[in-house]
Image (cartoon, grey):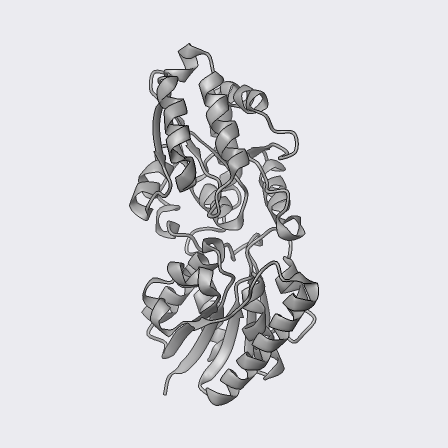
Amino acid sequence: MNKTVIMATGGTGGHVFPAVSVAEKIIESQCGIDVVFATDNRGLKYLGEFKDNAIVQNMKSKIGVLGFYWLVCLNTLKAIVYLHSNRNVAGVVGFGGYPSVPFTLASSLCRRKTIIHEQNAIIGRANKMLLNFRVDKMLMAFEEDVGTPTRFDDMYEEFKYSPSPESSEFKILALGGSQGSKIVTYNVSKAIVSLPSNIREKIHIYHQVRRDELPSIQKAYESASVSATVQDFFNEDEMRDIYTNVDITISRSGASTMFEIIGFGIPAVLVPFAQSVNGDQKANAERLSSIGGAIVLDEASISPEILASNIKSLFAHRNQLEEMSKAIKKININANSATRIANEIINIVK
């Protein structure tokens, strides 16, 4: 009988996608290890072929501190029962987010191999909680030779960023993260619309927004004669084309987006989510800005005027974009990160 590894993840795409990438590498290696996922209901939509065998946990939000800890304890007990009933489970890999805690904690308590992957520049609350227990390996994404897997790992070594010439369109990608962001969406659209016409007519923006925001954002760009592609979701092929053609990205600074930006070396204007748990988005953004790869704007003070000023400056100084890209690429930890993490797991579990 094959050994099994459980990938325990939070319910956002940022938690699930890296875990799926690693799981695929484990299976491709034909090492005799099967993979099962444990997540909450939100995470199911990101699991693809792994959805059918996933373990779904009830980890409701907004139930108060006592209610939350009750759910953690209840789900951990269920996870312990599962591990005792499934002796072929050799270990659990936690990819962050509170839904990852029950199985990762149960693995530690049951003396199974326990591995944690931390995507952010600082350790998140869930992983920090787990470090109070026995952990066989802690993998920090921002440290050399770890990284966070993304959809485009296979492209990073070959791709070389180059800003568009001044005679061409200046292409901007605006993202609000997997959960959307009104602060990013409306400040970006108002900033673009407010630009002088001689700049505005040379811009094309790819803007990912929430579905309910589509009509108003499209109308704003159309009214100002801005060339724009506005969608509520860009699929993997579309994002592949966009990333390899844009000049700058304006986005939140969640881990998955950060590692895609780092992988392609795209200069960024980052607006960290102020309510992110443990300040991880701010830490991620500051890591990139500290080496000259990004401009960081505080959510509390951002305005269309401030954002427009930064866009105008980057539009006018293409040489600055090249320097920012070179700085980003010094964080040389993206290529093949899924394979590296998969090999770590295989070596520990076997």
Farthest-out residue, left: 237
Q: Closer to the camera, 161 or 150?
A: 150
Q: Residue at x 48, y 40 (%)?
A: 176
Q: Closer to the camera, 199 or 136?
A: 199
Horizontal side of residue 215 vs 266, given as left or right: left
Q: Residue at x 41, y 29 (%)?
A: 216
Residue 141 in the image: above or below residue 203: below
Q: Quadrant of the N terminus?
A: bottom left
Q: Closer to the camera, 211 or 231?
A: 211
Residue 225 in the image: above or below residue 116: above
Q: Is residue 175 visible?
A: yes
Q: Residue at x 52, y 69 (%)?
A: 58
Q: Closer to the camera, 158 or 119?
A: 119
**Quarter of image, res 204:** top left
Residue 105 horizontal/vertical position (percent):
60, 75
**Quarter of image, res 283:** top right
Q: Is residue 112 visible?
A: no
Residue 310 horizontal/vertical position (percent):
55, 23
Residue 121 horizontal/vertical position (percent):
61, 51
Residue 259 horizontal/vertical position (percent):
48, 47
